[in-house]
Amino acid sequence: ATLCTIILPNEFYIRLIKPNSLSRKKLQQYSERVAQNHPKLRFEDPEDELEVGQLVYVKHDQEWSRAKIIALNRPRHKGIFIRVLLIDKGKFASVFDCNRHVVDLPDKNCTKIPPQSKKLRLEALQPIEEYTDYVTKKPSFRIANKWTEESLKFVTTLLEIAYRIEVEFSNYGD
């Protein structure tokens, strides 16, 4: 697995690396089909047809990828733009030209392929802060309300080290 996006130190996405898997090959075929036929797959009226939670293909970094719409924005007089999760890459993206860079699924069967990224959460990991105990006058630690810069760097370093370790999932895809 590959570390993709760190949302918080205790919440992040990884991407499963199975380059020769049947799922990966099928996704590549779907992306190629979208690249060739995207004008035919465009939505007639994205403002009316797109909705949060919908699975679509978006053009991001010069390639077409499956994406789940997580937010719709309709600023006055500017058209629609969306925020998506690239479900096979574990990354977030904003798409501002929905008429050209968002298309419908080329085949409903592509929804049967599980996402190639997975959101993970380290449940017991919490931010801490140093404080001085008023009774003993000694430094101590307690749970904090938000992550400090030091905590972010520490956990990010741990995740980067763990990123180099191969992770295997059982019962996931093919």
Image (cartoon, rainbow, N blue to C red):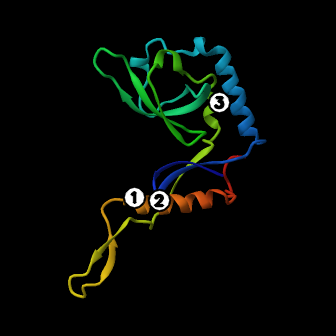
Q: Nearer the viewer, residue 7 or 151?
A: 151
Name which residue type carries label 3: Asn
Which residue corresponds to mark 1?
A: 149
Give left or right: position of 13 versus 113. Answer: left
Q: Secondary structure at mark 2?
A: helix
Residue drawn at x 43%, y 13% is: 45
Residue at the spot 24% in from the left edge and 85% down from the top edge: 137
Frontmost of labels 3 and 2 is 2
Name the residue: 31% across, 80% down: 139
Please rate how many residues cluster around mark 3, counting C-alpha atoms within 10 Å: few if below 14, some from 14 to 19, many from 20.
few
Secondary-structure class at tag 3: helix
Residue corresponding to mark 3? 109
Mark 1 residue type: Glu
The answer to whether mark 3 and mark 2 are in CB contact below 8 A is: no
Q: Is residue 119 visible?
A: yes
Q: Looking at the image, which is closer to me, 30 or 153?
A: 153
Residue kind at label 2, given as amino acid type = Lys
- The correct choice, above or below, for 12 with respect to 32 in the image is below
Q: Which of the 4 quarters of the picture holds residue 67? A: top right
Q: Secondary structure at mark 1?
A: helix
Q: Earlier in the sequence, mark 3 or mark 2?
A: 3
Q: Position of residue 72 (x, y in %)?
A: 38, 28
Q: CA distance from mark 3 to mark 1?
A: 44 Å
Q: Is residue 93 above or below residue 99?
A: below
Tell me the crowding category of disc 1: few under 14, some 14 to 19, or many 20 or more residues within 10 angstroms, Cα based: few
Residue 162 coordinates in the image, percent (x, y) = 61, 61
Give left or right: position of 14 versus 92.
Answer: right
Q: Which mark is residue 104?
A: none
Outermost residue toward the bottom? Answer: 136
Residue 77 screen position, x and y as percent: 30, 14
Residue shown at 55% from the left, 21% from the top? 104
Residue under circle 2? 153
